[in-house]
Amino acid sequence: MGCAPSIHVSQSGVIYCRDSEESNSPHQTTTISQGTATLHGLFIKTDAADAIPSVLAYQSRPPPPSASPRRRERREPGASARARAPRCCGVEAETQTSDADVKQASTTEVQIGPMRLTQDPIQVLLIFAKEDKQSDAFWWACDRAGYRRNIARTSESALECFLDKHQEIIVIDHRNSRYFDGGDICRSIRATKPSEHTVILAVVPRISTDEEESSVLPLLNAGFDRQFMENSSITACYNELVQIGHGEVRSQFKLRACNAVFTALDHCQEAIEITSDDHVIQYVNPAFEQMMGYHKEELIGKELTELPRSDKNCADLLDTINTFIKKGKLYKSHCDEKYTGDHSQSESHSFKCKSRRKDSIDVKSITSQSSDAPSLQTWRYSSMARIHSMTIEAPITKVINIINAAQENSPNTVAEALDRVLEILRTTELYSPQLGTKDEDPHTSDLVGGLMTDGLRRPSGNEQVFSKNMNLSHSHLSVPNTINDIPPCIAQLLDNEESWDFNIFELEAVTNKRPLVYLGLKIFACFGVSEFLNCSEATLRAWLQVIEANYHCSNSYHNSTHAADVLHATAFFLRKDRVKESLDHLDEVAALIAATIHDVDHPGRTNSFLCNAGSELAVLYNDMAVLESHHTALAFQLTTKDSKCNIFKNIDKNHYRTLRQAIIDMVLATEMTKHFEHVNKFVNSINKPMASEETSSNCEFTANIKNFPDNQTLIKRMMIKCADVANPCRPLELCIEWAGRISEEYFAQTDEEKRQGLPVVMPVFDRNTCSIPKSQISFIDYFITDMFDAWDAFAHLPVLMQHLANNYKHWKTLDELKCKSLRLPSENNN
């Protein structure tokens, strides 16, 4: 072949041969060089040349045994000559040289169903401590069969050779334990991963005719597959090896090919299951797990109709449905039909109706039932046909598919209940809770109704349009040239900016109701926003001034102080270790900008009010996320219209698109109609996986988050949502101030709705009758507690949770005392 085999010497001195059958050099010369020795046409590679003797004598390999008691100096026709290194590092190494006329082993093709595989020549490892007739017989038998062979003399060299070559057949001398224990060698090989596809043969001593044959159980327990009674006949050894090659080795080769099939199934995006004839699940792919909502460990071994019992399902209802599923039939998509059993075959039609009793009929036979069949059943069949004919299925479609399958042949009570389930699932508001009549708690009903609807309540005969006044007057406080020029009284307050107890109202007072520019300059400098955007501090300062000028200082709540408060909370969250490790610098910049602009030009009225009033903004944005859409659109308009305040002018276009999308997504997340959707997604995608990986390190968890941009998006949404409504988690005095401001804004809206004859969105917020403590309790119960529990579990915020508990206790105390104001009358007098 022109390529010589080699004997590799390990660091420990273990020697074994490689590709020994490929050598065709007949020369007996020996040369030594530094680190490499050429022996009889072989190469010995070693890190220590001095480990090889300077002179190595070689003798010819004995020919195969003959009828004569003595070995004769002759060979079988076409047989190969072998060379033996007597000793090297205390370990004997064997190899062979082949004559030119030795037949070369070739690859063979194996057909497995539609698969055509190529099988390489079989490799055999002979493990014999000493050369004798038996080892010679197996050696020449391998040569006759065209198998590649290696021979090892010690357990160490045997294991090392196997780990390198992965031979399909191993022959171990198990006749005596004088030199090594064959059982121990077998167990050591079986402990390795590659050995699962290897056939190991034990050579046992021949027994006399009067001796009872021993049990094979000890051999099987040691890991042997077969035993070979000592026989030095080359033909007997040849027959044994050929039988193994065409039997066990060929079967193992087919099993290895199955791994490729299962790998393909694992990567298939269609849900696939494989079952036995009795419909017991034997395999499911990841797509099937995702569709069913269970792990494969929960499904494998179960009948298709037997869902695992867990908190995910109600046992009584599940038993009822499963009872009728077993009596009826279950539809399966055509991709599943290919793998419904060990003997499954592809069907020509697109899908089938598979019976649990092994009978099957196609859709045509189902839809051709008598015309007097119930219309509900007819609808189910046609609906099922349409669903299964879809080539692209969303997860919700697959859920509906499963429920439709459960409806077949079910009694009317179950069918009607499942129809109701389908009706609920077909709505788009899957994450929004449905409120019943709550006459006993109108505060919760009004608050939720006002915040979580798009306000599609029609005006009662009054079509007056609410229009915002764009020409607002703003006080012009001198803005510092640089952050270092901030007045001392302001700078002193900003020194405490990193604390959660930072008093934003004190900053509002000393800045004449313009705290956003000053706090923005400080926070943006801390997070390197100017450096990331490649803009000057003067440009950033001009931008902050323009944005703040478009907040309405006339609003009691939605003004620039609220924006500064949300910016402060966002920066506080970004400094928490897990948040910081989960987000990139671009995410931080996007979050800070989103917090700054998230309520710009807020008119002090809710979306519901604007929609009911038919305002220009509501018409522009089709009554959907009206204010949030306006905040983002106006912010980018104000930014890009003037180069002096365009903080994005020097940023790369690709970075700008990514940054812009992140900012828009975060601001839109502050719309309360999607509140429960965002919280639920965060809990299911972040909190639950985090809880299940408690044993893993924090670095591993955050690294996994960074690998999935969708999870980073969920974190950013949750962060700005919590920052936007963090008032109940502030110190009590700040919480009380914010509660008074938002209540005043809602009171003003109710007053205006009554003046204009518009539907009153939140009747409970009537300044003459409203209980502020009740409204705060309802807001905390319904929106705040669960959201901050989830956010605290991720970001670790014990200070906030303590404030929340204290504030809730305050409002509860006032409510129990029938006090409707922010404080007790005695406290107000103080």
Image (spheres, rainbow, N blue to C red):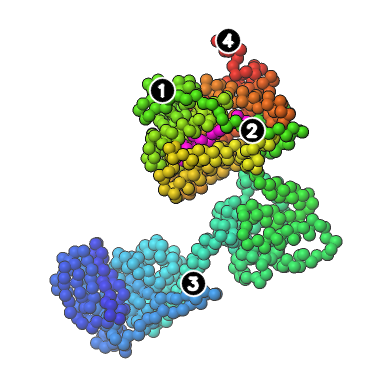
Instruction: Verify whether residue 592 appears in magenta.
Output: yes
The Cα atoms of the two marked residues, 2 and 3, are separated by: 76 Å
Which comes sooner in the sequence, label 2 or label 3?
Answer: 3
Q: Residue furthest left?
A: 54
User: Which residue sits furthest bottom?
Assistant: 77
Can the viewer see residue 132 in this picture?
A: no
Q: Which residues are magenta?
A: 589-605
Judging depth in this view, the residue of 606 and 225 nearest the camera is: 606
* Kind of residue at badge 1: Ile
Q: Amino acid at mark 4?
A: Asn
- Label 2 Cα crowd, 10 Å radius (few <14 / some 14-19 / many 20+): few
Give the residue at mark 1.
Answer: 490
Q: Reply above or below: 70 against 463.
A: below
Q: Nearer the viewer, residue 395 or 497?
A: 497
Label 1: how many residues lie within 10 Å, few (<14), some (14-19) or many (20+)? Answer: some
Q: What residue is rendered at 64% in x and 38% in y?
A: 616
Task: Give the x, y percent position of residue 823.
Answer: 59, 16
Q: Amino acid at mark 2?
A: Ser
Kindly indicate whether the residue at mark 2 contacts the one at mark 1 (C-beta within 8 angstroms): no
**Residue in front for this viewpoint, 802 or 523:** 523
- Residue 254's tag is 3
> CA–CA distance between discs 4 and 2?
40 Å
Tell me, for residue 467, which label it has, or none: 2
1 vs 3, front mark: 1
Q: CA distance from mark 1 to mark 2?
A: 36 Å
Total numbered circles: 4
The residue tagged 4 is 829
Secondary structure of residue under mark 2 = loop
* Position above or below: 769 against 264: above
